[in-house]
Amino acid sequence: MEKPRFRAALLHPRYWLTWLLFALWFLVAQLPYRWQLGIGRALGRLMLRLAPSRRTIAERNLALCFPELSDEARAELLRRNFDSNGIALMETGMAWFRSSRWLRKRFTIEGLEHLQEPQSRGQGVVLLAMHFTTLEIGAQLMSLCHRIDGMYRPHKNPVYDYMQRKGRERHGEDSEVFQRKDVRGMLRALQRGRAVWYAPDQDYGIKQGVFAPLFGVPAATVTGTSRFARVGRALVVPYTVTRLEDGSGYRVKVYPPIEEIPSGDELQDAVLVNQFVEARMRENPDQYMWVHRRFKTRPEGAPNVYEGVRKKKKKRRKAAK
């Protein structure tokens, strides 16, 4: 995919507010790290009050996945989770606007050899990511340690789309970016021995997936992990990025390959993926993106988990010419 290119059409007056917001975002990203954490928590508290649909989605996800917790414990987890979502907005600014030198001072990494070893012998790697609130900054931190190719979904606002591409590619050396639907491009990259970032832990429907248990609940799980590993002749190497409680930065952890994938059974592979994802979610439940409709696709006859929650209306995308 070609590099992001600035166009004069992006300066149209209808995009001035977007540019102004990006300018503000850039300025906030220059503040001391701990100040940004505090601003993020404040934004999270605001989101908790002003985003009732997202709050309800998170509440139902937590009730479904942690029925053993008391109402008070789940309410506290919900509050901390929205704090984490607010901080994620600040971290996106850090990832897009701060220097590599600044970022390098704020994380440690362990287990990098699990990625480097297969790469050194020319084998492709499916770098298995998860939708934690550290997802954006986490991908940037990983790209500072190893060349990785990424996935990309175009944004309907062309200015945001341009800035997102610029921000995500500024730290990666010789990285490629694939649109989410470009399966062939990703497979070719894996076959050439590259490491490709991939996060399969959202509900994309059952057309290209299977129902596999997650917290004991049937969850629509894409079979892409299995397919990429099999066709791309690649290893599946998971990693996580954890925001440290003391406010000192992040811990990046690369895990040993899930060598059982591909097993030849896509359902079994999906079960293995969900088991790994669930274990990581249990370790840091407050940092996971519970605001997503992870259980929106249900087996026939199963009740709608999000009954009564207002759906966001899809808008037609207007491209800048």
Image (cartoon, helix red, strand yellow):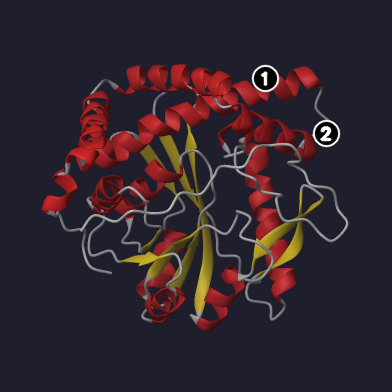
Q: Can residue 98 be seen in this view?
A: no
Q: In this view, does 2 lie above or below 95?
A: below
At x 28%, y 53%, the residue is: 165
Q: What element carries label 1?
A: helix
Q: In the drawing, does residue 186 fall left or right of residue 93? A: right
Determine the image quadrant of residue 146: bottom left
Q: How crowded is mark 2: few (under 14 residues within 10 Å), some or many (20 or more)?
A: few
Q: How crowded is mark 1: few (under 14 residues within 10 Å), some or many (20 or more)?
A: few
User: Can you tell which mark lies on residue 76?
Assistant: 1
Residues 247 and 198: in front is 198
Quarter of the rendering occupied by the N terminus = bottom left
> Which residue appears farthest toward the left when viewing the image?
8
Q: What residue type is labelled 2?
A: Pro
Query: Of marks 2 and 1, which one's residue comes earlier in the chain?
Result: 2
- Expressed as whole percent of the image width and height from the top left, the position of residue 114 reads 47, 61
Residues 176 and 4: in front is 4
User: Label 2: which residue?
Assistant: 67
Q: Which amino acid does label 1 sit on?
A: Glu
- Expressed as whole percent of the image width and height from the top left, the position of residue 6 reads 14, 54
- Expressed as whole percent of the image width and height from the top left, the position of residue 118 reads 43, 71
Q: How far apart are marks 2 and 1 (CA)?
A: 14 Å
